[in-house]
Image (tube, helix red, strand yellow):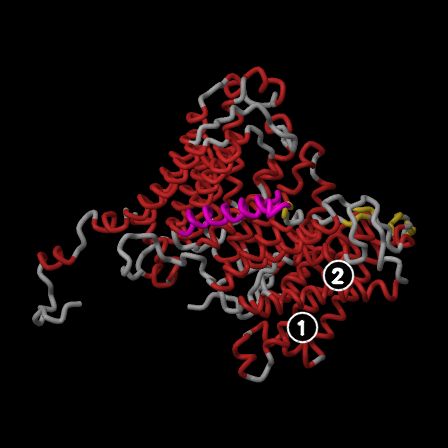
């Protein structure tokens, strides 16, 4: 039982972190960033030396943890800001479909850039192997990593809340998310806020890639896509632009996946994802604005 | 507005109203040039292909025609309604499997897909019959899903359609007695002649045009541009969207059946995210709101992809071979797409259509 709760929480943490990364950017520029998944993949591959072998030649991955973690976060943030400066800046104020396809094309470029350097084979890596050892809590054997994932996620969420509520920059970002043109008129600098959002979102992508990399022990170009899709769905059912909603929906989605895996009859288990997606459609039908509707995104007449 | 007319009686006579009303086929007459021109372009491509007579090139053009069908199918719903749907490729998947179920040799079917109902197990149809049934099946499925999904709009509708695609993919990837799960379903008769593909592409272009100028299509485009005003004028937006969704679903179904016959193998993952994004990119780069854009977007991007592949294979320059490194093709494609969209945010053609009359303003 406890096992299930922890599984649900740790899967939900991943989705929540991903959803947060997407919601942050959507909030400031109404962009659904499909390149986010590829930023996740890029951050983990930055630890490896370019080669096409199955065994990865670890390059930056041998750093001690107090350098490794900032390094990955910085890579994610750096790439994300670079995307903003080179590409997305040119797409402000275009329609959402165009932005979406542009972000997809950008993700495509990043993915094939990785493919060119590293080939499509997943690579086995071992990062911080201590974390894979199990620990015993209240009679359940859990991988230490699962526990750390949950704690780290909660810490990140608290940090983010404090950042958004207590600092000037956070205030500007929230203002921009609510009403961008009004915020600009009141002296919020657009470029700074948008770049800040991209940097934060990229750092979150870095965090996901670290957790994922340690959990699975592999670096896979496809790995961003799986988290990304669920994160994307969480962002929408949470209420696009609402950060709290994105986190809540991420945890709910993680819980739904884990719980359905347990309660569905054995014959139906392979179809679990179909039930999860069905539930997503149901939620959308009853709450098209999302669970927590963000102010300012409601359609006005 | 003519300025020479005298002051008009505020209450118009019946004849005056009748005179102002456009003739019954005036819109059709004005706009039929577009599908004819598009079909002629495709015809020219087909004739050149037959004249060249190269087998690999023939296959490339067949792929091109299949993509045209799929992207026109997307245009019917996405272009006219303005709702970004990620789910239409799901109907392509349904169509492709219907074609597989109905055309594979019954002996083989009994081995590979034993879970099929008896009447399907015994069926052995011609590919065109199967394609028609595929369209019907996909259309009915679209009606079923559309009844529920068309109540949503905006990004919620996009995600819901995506969830639908993911549902279809999950079911087809796991139902091994009926769909062979993730392993390939082989033995679908391959049609190598280019003409069936051309014919269907042409028919689909005309269907899309007919829908666009029909009452339903006009109402839907009005709802896309001014939802509030359209609803106030009595347009039932979910209903008009449903009409387009079903037509689009049927077109995607035919496209799926033809995809199956063009390569002879289907797996659920052929019809998932990568195909969705490739076709959506073609639609958006060409211009979402225009039939011309959707057809020429496919032609232009496919030409680009082929050109880059050609460069990747190597071109003799002087005495040495000059080849792009592997993977650069996709990177270049992505960059070109971003540049096109940055320069022309509403696609190459925007809302305009190809006509003979150059100074017609849209």
Residue B138 seen in the figure: yes
> Which portion, as a residue range, is magenta?
B293-319
Residue at 54% across / 18% down in the picture? B105
In x, y percent, where is residue B23? 17, 50
What is the chain identity of the residue bearing mark 1? A
Check disc 2: other Cα within 10 Å, few if <14, some if 14-19, many if 20+.
Answer: many
Q: Position of residue B144 (x, y in %)?
A: 47, 40
Q: Residue at x 49, y 58 (%)?
A: B154
Q: Is residue A9 left or right of residue A135?
A: left
Q: Main secondary structure of the magenta part?
A: helix
Which residue is located at x 60 percent, y 48 percent? B317
Task: Say if residue A233 shows up in the picture.
Answer: no
Label 1 sits on a secondary structure element that is helix
Q: Looking at the picture, how far across and down is residue B319, in whole percent?
A: 63, 45
Which badge, 2 or 1, is on the more N-terminal residue? 1
Graded by Cα atoms within 10 Å as few (under 14), some (14 to 19) or many (20 or more), the crowding at tag 1 reads many
Q: Furthest-top residue in view? A: B107
Seen in the image, is B242 located left or right of residue B160?
left
The residue that mark 2 highlights is A206
Locate residue B5, reporting x and y percent. Answer: 9, 69
Quarter holding residue B267: top right
Residue A196 location, quadrant: bottom right
């Amino acid at each position: 039982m406890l096992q299930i709760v922890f599984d649900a929480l740790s899967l939900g943490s991943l989705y929540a972190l991903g959803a947060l990364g997407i919601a942050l950017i959507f909030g400031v520029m109404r962009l659904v960033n499909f390149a986010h998944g590829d930023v996740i993949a890029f951050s983990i591959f930055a630890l490896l030396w370019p080669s096409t072998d199955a065994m990865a030649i670890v390059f930056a991955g041998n750093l001690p943890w107090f350098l490794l973690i900032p390094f990955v976060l910085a890579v994610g943030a750096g790439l994300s800001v670079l995307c903003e400066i080179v590409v997305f800046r040119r797409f402000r104020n275009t329609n959402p479909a165009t932005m979406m396809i542009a972000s997809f094309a950008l993700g495509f470029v990043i993915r094939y850039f990785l493919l060119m350097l590293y080939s499509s084979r997943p690579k086995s890596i071992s990062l911080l192997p201590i974390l894979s050892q199990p620990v015993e809590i209240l009679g359940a054997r859990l991988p230490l990593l699962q526990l750390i994932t949950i704690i780290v996620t909660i810490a990140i969420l608290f940090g983010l809340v404090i950042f958004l509520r207590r600092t000037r920059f956070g205030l500007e970002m929230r203002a921009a998310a609510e009403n961008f043109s009004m915020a600009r008129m009141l002296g919020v600098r657009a470029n700074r806020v948008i770049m800040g959002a991209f940097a934060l979102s990229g750092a979150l992508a870095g965090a996901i890639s670290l957790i994922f990399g340690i959990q699975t022990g592999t670096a896979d170009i496809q790995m961003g896509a799986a988290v990304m899709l669920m994160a994307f769905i969480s962002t929408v059912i949470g209420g696009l632009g609402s950060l709290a909603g994105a986190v809540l929906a991420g945890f709910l989605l993680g819980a739904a996946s884990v719980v359905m895996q347990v309660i569905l009859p054995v014959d139906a288990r392979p179809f679990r994802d179909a039930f999860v997606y069905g539930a997503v459609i149901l939620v959308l039908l009853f709450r098209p604005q999302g669970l927590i509707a963000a102010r300012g995104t409601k359609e006005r007449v | 507005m003519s300025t020479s007319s005298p002051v008009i009686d505020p209450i118009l006579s019946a004849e005056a109203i009748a005179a102002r009303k456009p003739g019954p086929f005036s819109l059709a007459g004005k706009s039929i040039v577009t599908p004819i021109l598009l079909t002629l372009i495709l015809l020219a491509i087909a004739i050149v292909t037959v004249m060249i007579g190269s087998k690999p090139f023939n296959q490339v053009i067949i792929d091109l025609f299949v993509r045209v069908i799929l992207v026109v199918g997307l245009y019917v719903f996405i272009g006219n309604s303005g709702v970004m749907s990620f789910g239409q490729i799901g109907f392509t998947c349904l169509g492709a499997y219907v074609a597989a179920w109905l055309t594979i040799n019954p002996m083989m079917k009994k081995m590979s897909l034993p879970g099929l109902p008896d009447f399907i197990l015994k069926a052995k149809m011609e590919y065109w019959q199967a394609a028609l049934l595929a369209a019907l099946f996909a259309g009915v499925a679209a009606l079923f899903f559309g009844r529920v999904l068309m109540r949503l709009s905006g990004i919620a509708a996009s995600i819901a359609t995506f969830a639908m695609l993911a549902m279809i993919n999950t079911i087809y990837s796991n139902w091994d007695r009926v769909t062979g799960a993730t392993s390939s379903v082989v033995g679908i008769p391959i049609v190598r002649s280019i003409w069936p593909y051309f014919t269907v592409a042409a028919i689909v272009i005309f269907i899309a045009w007919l829908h666009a100028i029909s009452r339903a299509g006009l109402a839907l485009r009005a709802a896309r541009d001014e939802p509030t005003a359209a609803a106030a004028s009595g347009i039932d937006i979910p209903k008009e969207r449903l009409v387009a969704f079903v037509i689009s679903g049927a077109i995607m179904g035919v496209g799926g059946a033809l995809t199956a016959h063009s390569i002879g193998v289907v797996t659920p993952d052929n019809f998932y995210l990568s195909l969705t994004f490739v076709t959506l990119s073609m639609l958006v780069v060409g211009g979402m709101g225009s039939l011309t854009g959707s057809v020429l977007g496919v032609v232009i991007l496919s030409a680009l992809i082929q050109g880059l592949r050609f460069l990747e294979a190597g071109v003799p320059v002087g005495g040495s071979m000059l080849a792009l490194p592997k993977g650069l093709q996709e990177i270049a494609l992505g960059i070109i797409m971003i540049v096109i969209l940055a320069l022309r945010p509403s696609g190459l053609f925007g809302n305009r259509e190809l006509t003979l009359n150059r100074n017609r303003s849209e």
